[in-house]
Image: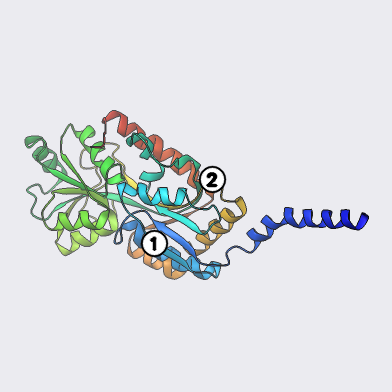
Amino acid sequence: MSRFLAFIATAAALFAAAPGHAEDAYPNHPIKLIVCLPPGGGVDTVSRMVADKMTRVLGQPVVVENKGGQSGNIGTEAVFNSTPDGYTLLASQPAPITTAPLLFKSLPYDPAKLEPVAVMSRISNTLLVRKDFPAKNVKEFIAYVKANPGKVTYASQGNGTTSHLTGAMFEAATGTKMNHVPYRGTAPAINDLVGGHVDVMFNELATSITLHKSGRATLLAVTSEKRFPELPDVPTMEEAGVPNFISDTWNAISAPPKTPAAIVAKLNAAVNQALKDPDLQAHFNQLHLQAVGGTPADLAKIVNDDTQRWGAVIKSANVTLQ
């Protein structure tokens, strides 16, 4: 009997320790990083660079898979319903993990239950117009939109994305009315802007600079607090006459609800180490991206702050999804 009891006690101890050992062994096979937008946009670009460096840090492949649709909600739902073992992660822009509940009547996931891992990057937005748009500065742009209410079309990455809400914020700040045209990601929106099928987009800085310098589109203003040294002649929105107009976007990694804290900590450390890689930092500098990193708590605060900021825009501008 004593031997039997000793066996039971030993088995119980091993059983209790098993989860810890499993987490200690993490990762022991490839990790899937689901980008909730189509290929070619900012989230996709950043995620692939970070995933490559995380692969070297973790010793297992971090494989990027694009699952776009519904402004990122489809990919986010897929991660939300995944096993919380650290092998399926979400790479997203702010919208699906901040303002989605404020814009959609019902969601198949609760972003508040996702486990924050880390912010990968942050970048300012811009006011970018098609190359042959009649207005050549912000003052002329506002006057043109006011003279043509509802006729100027502005593209976005999708309903509820930062580019969409920045357009709504602009309308509220300037007393103008434009026609919102949502796309399934940055790349198709930019393609139609360059092709002249839409008039304007509040787009991230890196792509906007490239298009502006090549003459395929015109950058009228940046939505940051200060001008960018590379664009000395391009004013901030505030300098152009629209006060307190600040808009930026970021890309972050999140994990399914109830992912063990030890696994989240390992992933967070891997992201932070990846962001310190000299080659990645050089690529980020070329794209005018700010490497962020930080703790899961830092990401949770950013999510909360952006939910409050854009929630106020949604409410004041009465933004609704059609």
Find the distance from the CA under tag 1 to the CA under tag 2. 26 Å
Quadrant in the picture for residue 20? bottom right
Farthest residue, direction right: 2
Percent x, y of residue 100: 36, 40
User: In the rendered image, is residue 218 in sight?
Assistant: yes
Circle nearer the viewer, 1 or 2: 1
Percent x, y of residue 140: 11, 42
Residue 208 left/right relative to 33: left
User: Local crowd at mark 2 within 10 Å, few (<14), some, or many (≥20)?
Assistant: few
User: At numbered mark 1, what does the secondary structure look like: helix, strand or loop?
Assistant: strand
Residue type at mark 2?
Answer: Ala
Q: Which residue is tagged 1? A: 65
User: In the rendered image, is residue 225 in sight?
Assistant: no
Quarter of the figure with the C terminus: top left
At horizontal 17% and vertical 48% (from top left) the residue drawn is 200
The residue closer to the viewer here, 11 or 129, is 11
Q: Which mark is residue 297?
A: 2
At horizontal 56% and vertical 47% (from top left) the residue drawn is 258
